[in-house]
Image (cartoon, rainbow, N blue to C red):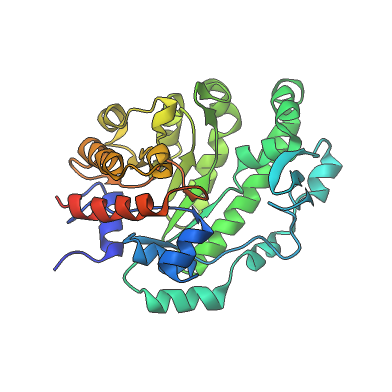
Amino acid sequence: MGMKPSERVAAALEHRQPDRVPLFEVWIDNDDLVNQVGGGDLQRTYVELGLDCILIPNQNPPGSNAWRDGVDEWGRVWRKGWYAGGVVETEADVERYTPPLDLADRCFDPARTEQVMERYPDHCFIYGSHVAPFTSAYLAMGMDRFFQDLYKRPAFIHRLLENRTEWCIAMFERAVSLGAKLLVLGEDAAHNGGPMISPQMWREFVLPHHQRIVEEAGAPVIWHSDGNILPLLPAAIEARFAGVHSLEPAAGVDLEQVKREYGADLVLIGNVDTAVLCGSDLEAVRQEVRRCLTQGAPGGGYMFSTCSSIFTGMNLEAVVEMYRYASERSMY
């Protein structure tokens, strides 16, 4: 008899070699896939795809403009569902655009979460949030103002990062209280050319907040970031993250190299190029699966995942085939 999904994930997090590589995905944001594979049920979709983890039910708080139109509770500006800037500039703005911590309760659905856990008791339940200090700060201020103020008003930036850290911890603690066993910090910090700020500035402004989040969250924390985060991986180890997710190949992240240099300290998750999932070449999908498993799986400490999420526009047949084939090929 093989391992239960939760046991498989636990083994990978401990850098042990499970019976097969865990299949992992944080966010599934493709309604067509949810309808066709999960019958409209997001959590069932994770299970039907063969994933070992399930994202616990969560939502934006009632009345939020996030991903809609207008200014949301964090000071982010949205136009027709797309991010369009930030309005936070002063201490008064920070207060205005910081929800009370008890609003975290309204970001979850305890009754629905309990039902899902009773239905799928063997799975690993996860929670992922982009209410992260660095990302929340630059989106709240607008990127131009934020990066200028790193130099002009460092004390204000420290204050805003601390504010967002408090909220991040509140969200994580609430998720853990509902049964989440693994947390994902959605903290996008890089583009294809490298980090948005230098490793030295990262250590000054961001690392202390990440260390606090990891210490107080109540469950292992995975750091998610798109882009070329290689220069920041030593800081990820210092923060004591359990692992890193994304490892975007289009940004030049070589899974084999990262495994060799950082695999002893960080669980590696991802590296599947989402470009192949937007096409119809299923053999290209299988080739990408083989590459990631060959480079990431040896010795354990790797979980198979896309380098991003399952988003609208992907070829559903390619997505289903990716997980089917990964399950078939991932036995140790």
The quarter of the displayed image where residue 283 is located: top left
Work out whether 20 lies above or below 158: below
Where is residue 41 drawn, in percent x and y? 48, 70
Q: Residue furthest right?
A: 92
Q: Residue at 18% of width from left, 50% of height from top?
A: 329
Q: Residue at 66% of width from left, 46% of height from top?
A: 164
The quarter of the displayed image where residue 136 is located: top right
Q: Is residue 302 left or right of residue 108?
A: left
Foreground residue, 298 or 219?
A: 298
Where is residue 56 drawn, in percent x and y? 49, 65
Q: Residue at 79% of width from left, 44% of height from top?
A: 94
Work out whether 39 lies above or below 156: below
Foreground residue, 144 or 280?
A: 280
* The N terminus: image quadrant: bottom left
Q: How many marks?
A: 0
Where is residue 171 drawn, in percent x and y? 59, 58
Q: Residue at 45% of width from left, 53% of height from top?
A: 26
Foreground residue, 170 or 81?
A: 81
Please say whether residue 240 is visible from this viewpoint. no
Foreground residue, 283 or 80?
A: 283
Where is residue 24 drawn, in percent x and y? 36, 53
